[in-house]
Image (cartoon, grey):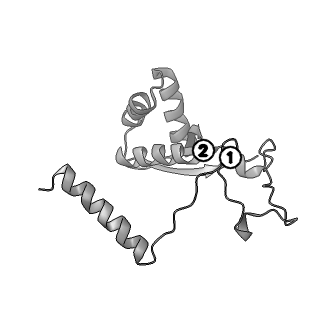
């Protein structure tokens, strides 16, 4: 077991040896009030060649920002009562909403049970798979 003193002396020795062996060169801290962003690298310069960083306009939304949908599909295995139970327990739907969605799955072959960000919808799809239901995700039409 290494003590705290031994660990700190090992860190100091490894840092000093890496500096001697051509390791990373420490960068000076940015001056007070200046931006800590490095603009000296050519890939970080703006298209005009100046050292001013350009800001992206994130206020406009395009089709890539459309929400994602979790779709549960009809299958020949699971009972209607079980599908309704899954919707109530996992999504927290009321009994009437869970029943309506279950009937939509049964009659139409599918139902959209959730919409939102991609990662969240991926978690929902995985959870539906864990319950034994057939589910997929797709991007909502803009």
Whole-percent x, y for residue 34 in the image: 70, 46
Q: In the rendered view, does 126 fall on the left or right side of 61?
A: left
If the image is split into quadrants, where does the N terminus sit? bottom left
- Residue at point 38% right, 29% down? 89
- Residue at point 48% right, 28% down? 98
**Label 2 belongs to which residue?**
69
- Residue at point 32% right, 61% down? 12
Q: Secondary structure at mark 1?
A: loop
Q: Quadrant of residue 39?
A: bottom right
Looking at the rendered structure, which numbered label has been put on residue 14? none
Q: In the rendered view, does 51 fall on the left or right side of 110?
A: right
Spot the residue most to the right. 48
3D distance between C-alphas at marks 1 and 2: 6 Å
Question: Is 39 situated above or below 67?
Answer: below
**For this rendering, which residue is in front, 135 or 50?**
50
Q: Are marks 1 and 2 in contact (CB under 8 Å)?
A: yes
Whole-percent x, y for residue 3 in the image: 16, 52
Spot the residue most to the left. 1
Looking at the rendered structure, which numbered label has been put on residue 140? 1
Whole-percent x, y for residue 82 in the image: 36, 35
**Mark 1 or 2, nearer chain start:** 2
Question: Is 26 situated above or below 139?
Answer: below
**For this rendering, which residue is in front, 35 or 114?**
35
Q: Is the residue marked by circle 1 packed among few (<14), some (14-19), or many (20+) residues within 10 Å?
A: some
């Amino acid at each position: 077991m290494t003590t705290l003193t031994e660990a700190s002396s090992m860190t100091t020795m490894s840092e000093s040896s890496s500096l001697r062996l051509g390791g990373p060169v420490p960068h000076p801290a940015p001056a007070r009030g200046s931006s800590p962003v490095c603009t000296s690298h050519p890939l970080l310069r703006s298209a005009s060649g100046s050292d001013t960083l350009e800001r992206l306009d994130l206020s406009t939304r395009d089709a890539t920002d459309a929400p994602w949908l979790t779709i549960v599909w009809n299958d020949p295995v699971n009972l209607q009562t079980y599908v309704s139970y899954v919707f109530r327990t996992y999504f927290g739907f009321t009994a009437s909403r869970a029943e309506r969605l279950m009937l939509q799955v049964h009659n139409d072959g599918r139902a959209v049970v959730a919409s939102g960000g991609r990662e969240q919808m991926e978690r929902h799809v995985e959870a539906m798979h864990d319950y034994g239901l057939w589910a997929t995700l797709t991007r909502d039409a803009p």
